[in-house]
Image (spheres, helix red, strand yellow):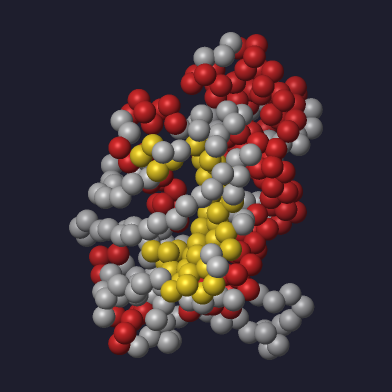
Amino acid sequence: AGEANVIPGLSFAIHPREAFGLVGESGSGKSTVALAIMRYLGRAGRLTAGRILFQGRDMAGLDDAGLRGVRGRHIAMIYQDPMSSLNPVMTIGRQLMEVPMRPEGVDAGTARARALVMLAEVKLADPAMLFDRYPHQLSGGQQQRIVIAMALIARPSLLIMDEPTTGLDVTVEAAVLDLVRELRRQHDTAILFISHNLGTVAQICDRVGVLYGGELVEQGSVRAVFGAPAHPYTRGLLDCLPTLGHDKHGAALRPIPGQVGSPLARPAGCVFAPRCVHADPRCTCGPIPPHAMGAYHEAHCV
């Protein structure tokens, strides 16, 4: 259909030891942002402008050798499906050992010891037994813990988690989220937590950015954004949440009408205007500047 600018303008910061949540419905550009940070866009995508600053270095300008020095060691990523990150024909232990052996050049004995310690840290029983198992011999929750262990074994400064609990049942999800909180404190790791589940973001994150059509329409502390949402899209996402203890007559779900528009036909002003019940001519005249809603809370809405 042609070339589309799917992330036209996006700016946010993540501070050391902070967890920043990125929320939005499917198609809003969350995973694209994560892949752009890691420079994993492949042949289908490319960076055309802007900077991605990590510890003072511009990721957008690094060559392949520079990226290899950052990926895994300083920035690690966890994907939605753990099986997409695990090699089915290699044992769990061998895959964990590769992480410190390749970039850091440690010997096999040291790498094995670190891998066993990491398996214990992610609360997996009998690490020595799991060490020689293959991914298909583990449950979904165990696989996700293995992937978290692989990401953290190199002690990265930034951990990007792209909907890491999507395929897990609620009890396993709760255990994994508790684990992430504990490991974040243990390793002083900053986290970019990407999810469409507002509940998990509220549990994990300090600040949150609401993404729609590749643009941040609102950002601020979790308490401020979820407690007093200022943008109609944020309010729409919160209205879509079911209320426990009520049936459809007592608390009906209020879906957001329409769907995310094509990036090939982006409106001139607010990207959410075509679906917004409050839209007026001001919304489509031009770019909407951010409005401060309080300390560390802003929204792009007239």
Residue 112 in view (yes/no): yes
Residue drawn where x is 57% and y is 14% of the image: 106
Q: Position of residue 223 (x, y in %)?
A: 64, 67
Residue drawn where x is 55% and y is 34% of the image: 156
Query: In the depicted view, which residue is nearer to us: 162 or 225?
Result: 225
Residue 159 sits above or below residue 135 on the image: below
- The N terminus sits in image quarter: bottom left
Residue drawn where x is 59% and y is 76% of the image: 228
Q: Position of residue 257 (x, y in %)?
A: 45, 80
The furthest residue to the front: 295
Residue drawn where x is 25% and y is 58% of the image: 4
Q: Position of residue 241 (x, y in %)?
A: 62, 73
Query: In the depicted view, which residue is nearer to us: 170 or 101?
Result: 101
Residue 244 sits above or below residue 66 on the image: below
- The C terminus sits in image quarter: bottom left
Quadrant in the rendering for residue 202:
bottom right
Query: In the depicted view, which residue is nearer to us: 211 or 92?
Result: 211
The furthest residue to the left: 2
Count of numbered circles in the view:
0
Q: Position of residue 200 (x, y in %)?
A: 64, 58
Q: Is residue 181 left or right of residue 65?
A: right
Quadrant in the rendering for residue 96:
top right
Q: Is residue 40 left or right of residue 221?
A: left
Residue 240 in view (yes/no): no
Q: Is residue 132 left or right of residue 281?
A: right
